Amino acid sequence: MRIYVGNLPYSMTDDELRDIFSEFGDLASAEVIKDKFSGQSKGFGFVDMPNNSEADAAIKALNETDMRGRKLTVNEARPRAERPRSGGRF
């Protein structure tokens, strides 16, 4: 299951995110999303957990918990909405 983790502290690293979720089971990946130009965290990330029951337990335990003064939003990730591609014309 792919899990969305929002309202992360901007100083959070991929390894710290992995550590938090690994308490609940195996992880396939954990990534804090960063701005492609500045490298600064965008304040959210994604965690992939192969076992759905472990993923559900992590969501229930971590949603709305305080992380360095920020209340996390943790839920099952929704598929990205299709956005029309621009033709490159302005």
Image (cartoon, rainbow, N blue to C red):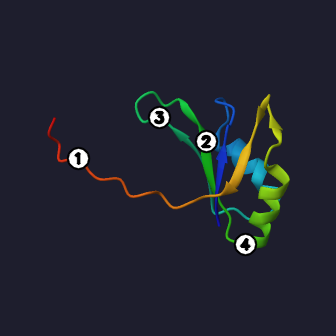
Which numbered disc, 3 or 4, marks the residue that appears first in the sequence?
Answer: 3
Q: Residues within 10 Å of mark 2 (few under 14, many from 20)?
A: many
Nearest the eye: 32 or 63: 63
Q: Nearer the viewer, mark 1 or mark 4?
A: 1
Label 3 vs label 4: CA separation?
A: 30 Å
Q: Amino acid at mark 3?
A: Asp
Q: Secondary structure at mark 2?
A: strand
Q: Residue at x 47, y 34 (%)?
A: 35
Q: Residues within 10 Å of mark 4 (few under 14, many from 20)?
A: some
Q: Amino acid at mark 1?
A: Ser
Circles 1 and 4: CB distance less than 8 Å? no
Q: Secondary structure at mark 3?
A: loop
Q: Secondary structure at mark 4?
A: loop
Q: Could you tell me residue 89's position as x and y percent?
A: 14, 40
Q: Which mark is residue 44?
A: 2
Question: Is 24 located above or below residue 18 in the figure?
Answer: below
Q: Residues within 10 Å of mark 3 (few under 14, many from 20)?
A: few
Q: Residue at x 69, y 32 (%)?
A: 9
Give the mark count.
4
Q: In the rendered image, which residue does mark 4 sit on?
A: 51
Nearest the eye: 68 or 39: 68
Q: Amino acid at mark 4?
A: Asn
Asked if residue 9 shows in the view, the reply is yes
- The quarter of the image holding the N terminus is bottom right
Q: Which mark is residue 86?
A: 1
Which numbered disc, 1 or 4, marks the residue that appears first in the sequence?
Answer: 4
Label 3 vs label 2: CA separation?
A: 11 Å
The quarter of the picture where residue 77 lies is bottom right
Q: Nearer the viewer, mark 4 or mark 2?
A: 2
Q: Residue at x 85, y 54 (%)?
A: 61
